[in-house]
Amino acid sequence: MALLTSLLLPLTCLATPTPDADDAKALIASLNRPAPARTPFAEARFMRVLDKPLVVSGELAWLGGDRLERRVETPTKEVSTIADGEVTQEREGKKPRSFSLKRAPQLQVLLDSFVALLAGDPSRLGQSFDVTLGRDADRWRLTLTPRDARIAKQIAGIHVYGTGQLARCMRMDESDGDTSIDLLGDLAAKMPAEPTREGLIAQCGGAM
């Protein structure tokens, strides 16, 4: 996924919350994790220009506030950090580079989603997204649709799959047809050797 496999309101514009909106708010609040919160991840990025997906794995970390870290261990080592409105990338064998988060509005959206989910903050999530919730027994899927039309030109939607109070996957569909799917926690170790988009969606819990 574009940096973080960034993962994260009023939930609607209605004056009176609906039962579904209340359910979504309660679920998001239940996802709260104290910082620092770290989780293994494995990401497959499906791009139209490539025959095979790009697969990386490592660790995602919320360090508190608006500070995120994405540490890639394989196939090469790389650390990307968002903090104080700056993005810093450190790649093995290369000089670190930094740039303003304002240059990458899609990263701001991922930051908002990932932080809001880990902080259990439905109000913040709703500032950037329209949020809908689908359920199937203990499984659930949150669909986050960007409110900003400029962002929507880049990101069609983010889908967060989980069970109980645990997020298991994050999928980002870009408006140009590319898709990134992150397997989180224990599921990260189960990334197939040759992943497919449909197979990973099924592995995450299906398209509810």
Image (tube, grey):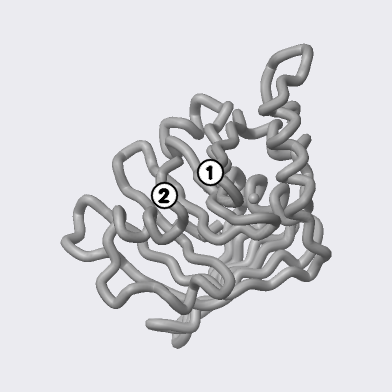
> For residue 206, which numbered disc appears in the image?
2
Is 110 rendered above or below residue 208?
A: below
Is 13 rendered above or below residue 39?
A: above
Which of the two discs, 1 and 2, sits closer to the camera? 1
Along the horizontal axis of the image, is 192 left or right of 127? left
Total labels: the figure holds: 2
Whether the residues at callouts 1 and 2 have beta carbons within 8 Å, the answer is: yes
Residue for point 42% across, 75% down: 190
> For residue 136, which numbered disc appears in the image?
1
Q: In the rendered image, which quarter contains the N terminus?
A: bottom left
Callout 2 secondary element: loop
Question: x, y percentage for residue 14?
Answer: 71, 14
Question: x, y percentage for residue 201?
Answer: 38, 54
Question: x, y percentage for residue 169?
Answer: 51, 58
Mark 1 nearby-residue class (10 Å; few <14, some 14–19, many ≥20): few
> For residue 44, which numbered disc appears in the image?
none
Residue at the outermost left position: 51
Residue at the outermost top position: 15
Along the horizontal axis of the image, is 38 left or right of 53? right
Mark 2 nearby-residue class (10 Å; few <14, some 14–19, many ≥20): some
Q: Is residue 91 visible?
A: yes
State how far apart marks 1 and 2 are (Cα). Answer: 10 Å
Residue 67, located in which quarter of the rendered image?
bottom right
Residue type beneath disc 2: Gly
Residue at the outermost right position: 34
Callout 1 secondary element: strand
Residue for point 56% across, 27% down: 148
